[in-house]
Amino acid sequence: MEKSVKLWLRERNVYLGKKTKVSELDEFLLRVRSKVTSFDLIRIGEDSDGGYLLPDDFEDIDACFSPGVSVETHFESALSSKGIMSHLADFSVDQPEMEGDSFSFEKKFLGIENDTIHMTLESWVNRKAQNDSENMILQMDIEGDEYDVIFDTSNDILKRFRIIVIEFHRLDTLLDRYGYQIINTAFRKLLKNFSVVHIHPNNCSEPVRFKGYDFPPVMEFTFLRNDRISEADFVESFPHELDRMNVPGNNDFTLPKCWYASYNKL
């Protein structure tokens, strides 16, 4: 019962328990700053939800792994036009809209075990990837299960992706000590081999404000593997000209300034 009450309150931006220290929030925001690269960002997919900004670094990309696809395949179709095969997965649909031989589909959720409903990212990659390719894309929108998948997947498998795009959920729980530990640990693991190159807040939910900081609950992060990055500068302005709102009709907002490099220097 207590857990249900806490969840009910959290959905309404009311937090119980120990708060995260401001110094820890500062450190996290500095860690996830977007880096400048030699590749322009281009938009792949829809001009609304389902479209993402990726670095234009597609040469020799072998495949994209796209769990949580639902029925929309505009992102994967755009990659197909570049000659990139996409592997899709989602247990909640019988078959996404896709044509041609540039797609494969498995009716399973991505998770931390392999059974009739779930499969791990590691097992999926080992079955579908070409040999030991390190030129792949991971695009993952799995409604909060991304943290379990990141923790469960080895760095050796993650490093096989050149570009990773993840929609992170419940980012407002960074304000809560327990939520901070989960989210911070997931990002630390990714940032061992990748750098953030773009952030876009999803306007499906309003940002949560805390002591001058704004935390959108849902945001899309684009990562590029560190061996593809030579610059050391950080992106100084948002939004990008190709950013679009996810939910037309909802109040739109740009990435809060506390996530910018220039705003957040310690």
Image (spheres, grey):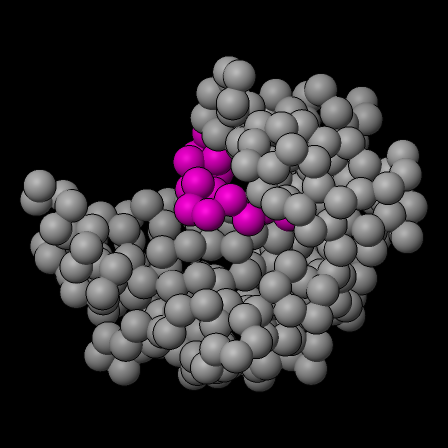
Q: Is residue 184 above or below residue 29?
A: above
Residue at horizontal 44%, vertical 40%?
Answer: 145
The spot of residue 166 in percent (x, y) is 56, 52
Residue at horizontal 12%, vertical 51%?
Answer: 5
Q: Is residue 128 left or right of residue 145?
A: right
Return the residue found at the far front.
94
Q: Is residue 232 left or right of residue 205?
A: right
Quadrant of the rendering where the N terminus is positioned: top left
Q: Is residue 245 left or right of residue 65?
A: left
Q: Is residue 22 above or below residue 7?
A: below
Say which of 245 and 160 sits in front: 245
The spot of residue 11 in percent (x, y) is 25, 60
Say which of 214 and 145 sits in front: 145
Residue 12 figure quarter: bottom left
Asked whether 73 falls inside the magenta stretch, the response is no
Q: Is residue 30 left or right of residue 239?
A: left
Residue at horizontal 66%, vertical 42%?
Answer: 66
Residue 139: tell me if it is visible.
yes
Residue 189: tell me if it is visible.
no
Q: Which residues are magenta?
A: 138-154
How many numbered badges does the structure rendering display?
Answer: 0
Quadrant of the rendering where the C terminus is positioned: bottom left
The spot of residue 168 in percent (x, y) is 47, 54
Residue 134 figure quarter: top right
Residue at horizontal 22%, vertical 79%?
Answer: 211
Q: Is residue 101 above or below residue 254?
A: above
Say which of 225 and 67 sits in front: 67
